Image (cartoon, rainbow, N blue to C red):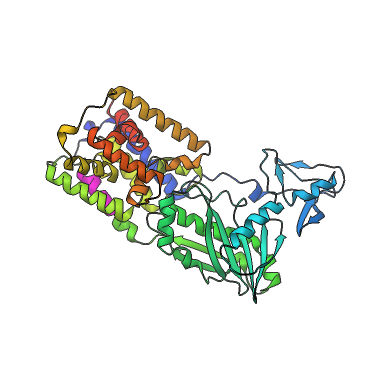
Amino acid sequence: MIPLKNIPIKKALATTVVGAFFLFFWINGPLQFTEVLAHLDQEETPYSTPKIIGEVHGIKSFGEIGEVETHGDGWQLLHKNHKKEANLGTGIISFEQEALIFSEEHAEVLENHVSQLLKGKLAITHHTNEALLYLHIKSENEIYYYLESAPIIKHIKGYAGPINVGILLNQKGEIEQIQHVSSKETESYLTKIQKAGFYHAFIGLPIEDYHAIDAVSGATLTTVSIAQTTTEITQLLGNDFTETLHNDLLVSSFEVEALNTFTWIIHILLIAVLFTYGIQKKYKKSKRDIRILSMVSVLYIGFFMNSSFTYVSFIHPFLGTALSPLIAFYALFSLLGAVWGHNIYCSYVCPFGHAQRLALQLSNKRFTSKFFLSNKVVSHIRNAITLLLIIGILLGIRSWGNFELFPDLFGMAFNSLWFGISLVILLINFRYPFIWCRIACPTGAVLDGISTVCKK
């Protein structure tokens, strides 16, 4: 046991901060930023009460009667001063220029999407309530409802932000189909979700009461977000569905939750073993052991799990995105490995780092060469890339979080640009070893920075 007087103050302090950070978000979840539109409480007056002022192609327009414009909580109601305003559709406009306006163009987009789910001749009418636009569809002798979460649901986020989910309901009050319409999620993870049959788990679920389905390991954030989005957008349809077809359905009680299976415990235990091996100093780390470690990391964490861990995991709680238990503990181990070791994650755990190491063992060492830029310049380039990415993500460019080679390479997404880049990096690695880790990996930059600070 290490005597207390020999424990470095900086490392002890960093461990306390990391532990407090982990426990806070583990108990309370991510920081939630209030969506004004979703929680708008406004006092009505005879002048501010919204009224139907017109209907264009089946889409109702709401506004005020008269010239009075009501301001409150940063929002204003549409008001009818000109006839052409009836063509705007239904919506509320914010001072920040974000609008929920359901236009004819939006309805046409929904029609195109539903035509991918239902074949044959469809009789479609457009309807709106105070929350959303939806389609009423007659297909032969069947009746369906179709609705999408965009642009309504913005506060539920996957790995790279909100996910637009399309939901098709049948006249029995069940989910007929759901589909991923659009998002900024990593393509290889979306493919993994589809191959796992995740969307089929929704088929036939009555839109009342609670339902639990399995999340997809390795794509937990995305699948949990899809389930939560499905719940909320279906509840927003609410009375429009029950009054038309099923008066006895309690849509307000509907919830579908994607739960982690206990396989994540097995995954994290193996990852913990790799971190423990890396940080311990009692047993010598032989070349043979490192080779075995590399193969385990590449085959199990890379190809089998394909659960990407990156610097984005550290900032997800500040973006309103929850961490899965697997990624939460993964992040904790990585941070502690940077505090107490010399970036244990990059040295002993990262599958792409090990893939480069194994590739070098197959190469002709006489072909390797010193990189033409100095280590200092290379470090500055990597730090600049990392800083730019973090600032961009915090400013809302969530797709920048997909700046990584891990998922597409080990997910074998052959048509992906990142898959091609990862192969090129592996080839360059024969000439300039660990080139990605040294010049472009933001995760390595963050962990190396923590390690350096704790050593000083």
Residue 269 part of the magenta segment:
yes
- Residue 352: name its quadrant: top left
Q: Residue furthest bottom?
A: 141
343 vs 209: above or below: above
User: Seen from this angle, which residue lies furthest front?
Assistant: 120
Q: Is residue 442 left or right of residue 274?
A: right
Query: Which quarter of the figure is the N terminus placed in?
Result: top left
Q: Position of residue 326 (x, y in %)?
A: 36, 52
Q: What residue is rendered at 20% in x and 47% in y?
A: 293
The answer to whether residue 404 is above or below residue 152 is above
Q: Is residue 282 above or below residue 102?
A: above
Across and down, in percent, residue 110 comes to 63, 57
Which residue is rendered at x = 21% and y = 50% of the image? 295
Question: How many numbered circles does the render carry?
Answer: 0
The residue at the point 51 percent across, 59 percent down is 227
Residue 44: in sight, yes or no?
A: no
Please tell me which residue lies in front, 106 or 65. Answer: 106
Whether residue 424 is visible here, answered yes or no, is yes
Q: Is residue 277 left or right of residue 164?
A: left
* Residue 351 magenta: no
Question: Which is nearer the eye, 247 or 6?
Answer: 247
- Quarter assignment of residue 428: top left
Residue 31's spot in the image, x, y percent?
Answer: 51, 44
Q: Quadrant of the C terminus?
A: top left
User: The magenta stretch spans which residues?
Assistant: 268-277
Q: Position of residue 196 (x, y in %)?
A: 40, 62
Residue 422 in the figure: left or right of residue 213: left
Q: Nearer the viewer, residue 220 or 318?
A: 220
Q: Main secondary structure of the magenta part?
A: helix
